[in-house]
Amino acid sequence: MVKMPSEIKDALAKQKPIPIATATKDGTPNVIFIGLMKILDDETLLFADNFFLKTAANLSENPRISLLCYDSDTKKSYQLKGSSKVYKAGPQFDEMRKWVHGVNPKLPAKAAVVVKIEAIYDAMWGPSAGKLIV
Ligand SMILES: Cc1cc2nc3c(=O)[nH]c(=O)nc-3n(C[C@H](O)[C@H](O)[C@H](O)COP(=O)(O)O)c2cc1C
């Protein structure tokens, strides 16, 4: 697990939607947009599964996840990689439902996806492109 520096949390918080990549067990990639993302703490993100289909299937067999963000104010871009856990009951699920239904009570709020960040790379063009930040 790694701690997200504040400039990376700021970049993530500003970006909407965020592209999220998952993969099947045998590595077939899939990317979606997420609008509902919450930063729980320096190491942890929360997503709401409202409409996941292939993403839900992927997460059930492969917890690995990757996100991409670009901050047009700072001109910085980051790739984040992490591991997820899906909750369909319990405190994480209850927290997700409260948050999602506060945004829009009609959303299905099917599951909470809690992501622990494990690595962050520079995704801006230039000499540091692709290199590990933390
Ligand atoms: C702008 C935008 C924001 C979205 N935000 C969410 C979201 O927060 N939660 C969600 O479950 N689906 C969201 N979606 C839908 C997913 O991108 C996607 O359509 C869904 O997960 C089904 O794709 P899949 O079969 O690859 O999982 C959003 C789509 C768009 C275009």
Image (cartoon, helix red, strand yellow):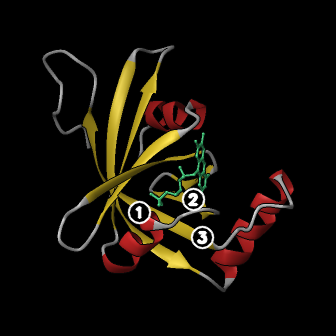
Q: Locate the N terminus by quadrant.
A: bottom left
Say if mark 3 contacts mark 1, CB within 8 Å.
no
In the depicted structure, whether residue 33 falls above or below residue 51? above
Q: Secondary structure at mark 2?
A: strand
Residue at the spot of label 3:
112
Which residue occupies 46% across, 30% down? 7
Badge 3 local density, few (<14 within 10 Å), some, or many (20+)? many
Badge 2 local density, few (<14 within 10 Å), some, or many (20+)? many
The amino acid at mark 2 is Phe
Give the farthest residue toward the left: 127
Q: Secondary structure at mark 3?
A: strand
Residue at the spot of label 1:
116
Residue 99: percent from left, percent from top: 77, 60
Which residue occupies 50% across, 30% down? 11
The amino acid at mark 1 is Lys
Residue at the spot of label 2:
47
Say if mark 3 contacts mark 2, CB within 8 Å.
yes
**Would you identify the image quadrant in which residue 77 lies?**
top left
Answer with mark 3 or mark 2, whichever residue precedes in sequence. 2
Relative to residue 105, is residue 38 drawn left or right?
left
Give the farthest residue toward the bottom: 89
In the depicted structure, whether residue 9 falls above or below residue 52? above
The amino acid at mark 3 is Ala
